[in-house]
Amino acid sequence: MSAAPTRVALVGPAHPYKGGGARHTTELAHRLRALGHPTAIESWRAQYPAALYPGRQTITDPEGEPYPDTRHDLAWYRPDGWWRTGRRLADTTDLVALTLFSPVQVPAYLGVLAGVRSRRADTRVVALCHNVLPHERRAVDVSLTRALLRRVDAVVTHSPDQALLAEGLRGAARSRPVVAQMPPHLPETGGPRPAAPGERRHLLFLGIVRPYKGVDVLLRALAAGAPEDVTLTVAGEFWGGSGELAELAGELGVADRVRFREGYVPAADLPGLFAEADAVVLPYRTATATQNVWLAHEHGVPVVATRAGTLADHVRDGVDGLLCAPDDVADLARALKEFYAPGEPERLRSGVRPVDAAPYWRAYTERLLGA
């Protein structure tokens, strides 16, 4: 006999919020509903104060199929709304998943949790941690996250390292965090452009530019290891602007080889960026989980990445990309030099295969529902 359906509420961003977090929440809702579990999304009317997120928070055009049963009632400045949402969810759901991206969300999530508990004790509440703690953290971040993780019924993380971090915050007396590997939730881009033969002599970094992403390491490696005719595009939102990186490129003598494309990259622009590149380079110092390896492979492009976080799990070294040590200019320079050995870009491109998302999602939903 099959198990009874679980009524699920996902509390997290959805369109018009942009980026991987919104896509993940939306895709998860679609997948749960397809499995027969009635699912709703409780999204935000205002997720963060503008001062805490210097980039663009929302977009006009959805990057995938929006989820129909989505509410936008939560606001960071309305604690009364947090409580009311929790009480309503206690009456209508069996499982509430609080999708944690930043400690800024924790006060609202504690309000939702308090509302649930005031109404019913048997509604399970899970913290679904995309990041247990920020890559660049403050002392208050630890206190806030600990307060949430010690109050929920279960914690789900996307890697063993993140689970270990969550376990330390949660305390030994509580259930151990569940590890569920992040599944693919790629934007709808219309598919890759037909690949032109030959090398482009061009590399691409894509994503939010923050110190932990290691773009400064990439610039130094470009100067030290890549052939002098190879160029680079850094495309994404720059936290704090591109001034310091542009200055570094000038000091390294590669300013004429680097283009900074500032601002959020909409899905419609991605095929063109990938078509111009021989490889996507992900020089992360640290990482939890990222979609950018799968996104590059979806567009037929190999990846040069560090072994930070789960990046190495998605790159077959020497088959569809190359791996190197994190925060190591010399090793990244070595990888770029090897990548541009005669015939190597085309050989690695021929090894790229799109990811099969179904097995990842099957395992992920099972872990979440069983947490």
Image (cartoon, helix red, strand yellow):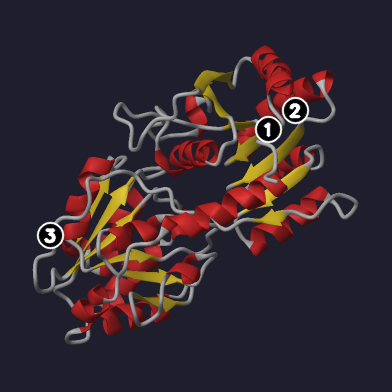
* Disc 3 residue type (three-letter): Pro
Q: Residues within 10 Å of mark 3 (few under 14, many from 20)?
A: few
Report x, y in % for residue 368. Answer: 65, 47
- How far is the residue under mark 2 from the one under mark 3? 49 Å
Placement of 101 over or under 337, stated as above or below: above
Mark number, residue 113: 2
**Quadrant in the rendering for residue 36:** top right
The answer to whether the residues at label 2 and label 1 have Cβ atoms under 8 Å apart is: no
Task: Report the side of 164 relative to 261 (left or right).
Answer: right
Distance from Cα at disc 2 to Cα at disc 1: 9 Å
Viewer-proximal residue among 266 and 34: 34
Residue 135: in sight, yes or no? Answer: no
> In this rendering, would 333 be left or right of 174?
left
In the rendered view, tell whether residue 127 sits above or below residue 183: above
Q: Amino acid at mark 1?
A: Val
- Name the residue beneath numbered marker 1: 96
Furthest toward the front, the residue is 1
The label on residue 85 is: none
CB under 8 Å between callouts 3 and 1?
no
Q: Amino acid at mark 2?
A: Leu
User: Marks 3 and 1, Cα distance to the nearest angstrom?
Assistant: 43 Å
